[in-house]
Image (tube, rainbow, N blue to C red):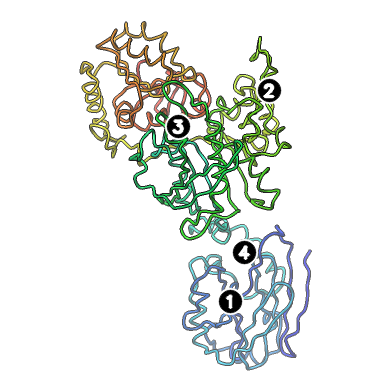
Amino acid sequence: SSSCCMSGLDHHRSAITLHLPNRSNSRGIKQLGFVYFSRQRSSFSLRTHSSSDANYNQGGSGSSSSSTDGSAIGQQQDHPHQQEEERQPHHNKDQLIAPVRDNSGSIVAFRVFSQPQSGESELLNLRVNGTLRREEEKQVQEEEVETGMHQINERSYGEKFHIAATHNTVFEAIHEKTDIEEKIPEVEKESGHEGYDRTPTKVTYNIVFVTSEAAPYSKTGGLGDVCGSLPISLAARGHRVMVISPRYLHGTTQDERFSRVLDINCRIKVSCFGGEHEVAFFHEYRAGVDWVFVDHPAYHRPGNPYGDKFGAFGDNQFRFTLLCHAACEAPLVLPLGGYTYGEKCLFLVNDWHASLVSVLLAAKYRPHGVYKDARSILVIHNLAHQGVEPAITYNNLGLTPQWYGALEWVFPEWARAHALDKGEAVNVLKGAIVISDRILTVSKGYSWEITTVEGGYGLHELLTSRQFVLNGIVNGINNSEWNPSTDEHIAAHYSVDDLSGKAECKAALQKELGLPLRPDCPLIGFIGRLDYQKGIDLIQAAVPELMQDDVQFVMLGSGDPRYEGWMKVTEATYRDKFRGWVGFNVPISHRITAGCDILLMPSRFEPCGLNQLYAMRYGTIPVVHATGGLRDTVETYNPYAVGPSGNGTGTGWA
C-alpha cells in the first residue's frame, strides 16, 4: 500500500507525494534536486542525478547555490504546438511524476506535480517527509538551467534507464519503479559503479601492540616476525599504531639494532614487586609506526630475550611485569607526534609476556574511570608457554586481592605426582583468556586444537567456554623482505617465470657449507628452534637411515644443548652429507630457504609457522606434519590427484 499527502504551493500549483514501502528502514533518503517551471514550456523532461554527482553539486555555469541531490526536471526545446497546448485546460498529461530515491538508488516515493500557471520561475526543494518548501530564485537564466541539466555524470540513472518524461497515471510510474530497481544492479556492475552510493565509512583505531620481541630489534621466532611486520601493514591502512617492547642490549652499552632509537626523556615509576621501579622510554618512528622501547637494567644482560646458555632467566616474571605496567602508561604519557594516544586504544597483547595488560586494564584502570573505552585482544602464538609461577608471587604483580581468581591455577594431579604441595599457582595467560575482549590464534586449525585435551595444555575447558570470542587468523609474510627476485642475501635472483637462479643458489649454498657441488642430489634443510616441539628428536632418530641415501642435509637453529651437541657430532660423522649451524643467522636462513630443494618441518604442534610460507615463496617444497597452521597453509600432496590437464599434479620424488 502507498500513502498519499497533499501540499499546497499556492492557487496555481500543487504536489502529491506517494510513499512506497521501503525494503529497509535503515536506508538514508535521497532528496530531489532541481525542479524548474516556466509558463513558456508546457512539456517537461525528467532527468536524474546521483547524490555523488560532482558536476551537479558544482552546477557548472547554470546551477543554483541552493541545489540538492536527486532528480532534475529540465525544459525541452520549443515546439510549434506548444502555444496551442498552453491555451488548453490542464489534463493528466500536464501532471509531472518524479521518483524519489534513497541512497542505494531505490525508488521509495513518487511526486505528482500539477503544472504551474504562473509566469514566475520557481526553484522547488522537495523533501520526502511530505513537506514541500519553495525557495524563490529571482534570476535564473533559461540557458543556465539548460546547461545545468545537461551536465549529468556518467553514474546518472536517468541516462542509463531513459526515464520517461511524464506518466499519465501513478500506476505507470509504479511500473517504472519496478523495472528500474530490477536493472540497477546490472547497470551498476556494467558501469563499474556497483555500490558507489553505499561506500562504508572508514574507521581507524589507535592500536597498541605489546610484545616481548619485534623484528628487526629482537627476534627468536615467529612472534618477532609478526610483531615486526603486522603493525606496518595496519599503519598503511590508516591506523595509528604503537609497538611496545623491551630494549634488549645483550650485555652491551649500545646495541646496533637500537642505533636509531632515541631517548625521549620520559621516566615513570612502576609499582610492583614490593616497591617502585623506574623505567625509561625510547622511541623511533619508522614505516608509519611508533616503535617504543621500555628500558630497565633487567633487559641489558647477555643472552636472548628469555634466557641464556644456562636456561631461562629466573626473574622473567619481574621483567615482563615491568613491560606490562609500562605499556599501560605509555599511551597516556608519551606525546608521540605532538599528542598522546589517549585512553581510547585497542591493545593487542601477544602471548603470556604481555597478558598482564588485559588484567591491568580491568583491575587497575577502569575502576578509576581510565581506559573505560579501551579494548584488549589476546593473541596466542604458543599456548605451551603460559607464565605459570607459584601462587605466592601474585602479590608482586601490582593487583588487588579480589582479582586473584582470574589468575588462579592448580596443576593437575598427574603433573604433581609425589609433590608435597597442592600445586597452587598463578597463570598470567589464563588471566588474559578470562578477561580479554577477544582471543586470536595464528591459524584456524590451531584455534580448534587448543580447545582439545591434547592441545589445550590444561586450558582447553576455559578456552572452550570462551569459544564465541575465539578466532584464528593465519599469519602472513613480508613479501618485500622475502622475495627471491630482489633478496639481497642470496647468490642469484629468480622468479616463478624464470627458476634458473635457484640452481645457482643451491650451488652457492653447497660451496659455502663445504658440501660437494652436486646439482642432482636432493638438498634438505631445517630452520628453527632445537626443542621437543619442533620434532628434533624425530630428525635425530631418522638421520642415520637418511644418510644411507644419496641426500644432503643442513640444519640451522639453537635451543636445547643436547640437540646442539648432537648436531656437532653428526656433522663430524657425515662430513660430505650433513652440516649443522648452531645459532641463528638471518642471511644464512635466506640462503638455506633459496638453496634447498626440500624444507623439513616435523613439528609436533605448530600454531602457524612461517618457514613453510617462506619455502613456498622461494620454490622450495615444504614437507610438514599436518598440524595447526601447517595443515592450513600446505596443500596435501596426492600423486593420484587429477588436474585440469588430466594428469597427476605431483611435483616429484613420488
Spot occupied by residue 85 in the image (x, y as percentages of width and height): 63, 89
Secondary structure under badge 4?
A: loop
Q: CA distance from mark 3 to mark 2?
A: 27 Å
List the residue tagged with mark 3: 305
Spot occupied by residue 354 in the image (x, y as percentages of width and height): 55, 37
> Which quadrant of the figure contains the C terminus?
top left
Q: Is residue 526 left or right of residue 122?
A: left
Q: Are marks 3 and 1 in contact (CB under 8 Å)?
A: no
> In the rendered structure, which amino acid carries the disc numbered 3?
Pro
Q: Is residue 91 left or right of residue 237?
A: right
* Of the image marks 4 and 1, the number of the one nearer the N terminus: 1
List the residue tagged with mark 1: 72
Of the numbered discs in the image, which one, if any, rests on residue 103?
Answer: 4
Secondary structure under badge 3?
A: loop
Q: Residue at x 26, y 15 (%)?
A: 521
Label 2 CA crowd tier, 10 Å (few <14, some 14–19, many 20+): some
* Of the image marks 4 and 2, the number of the one nearer the N terminus: 4
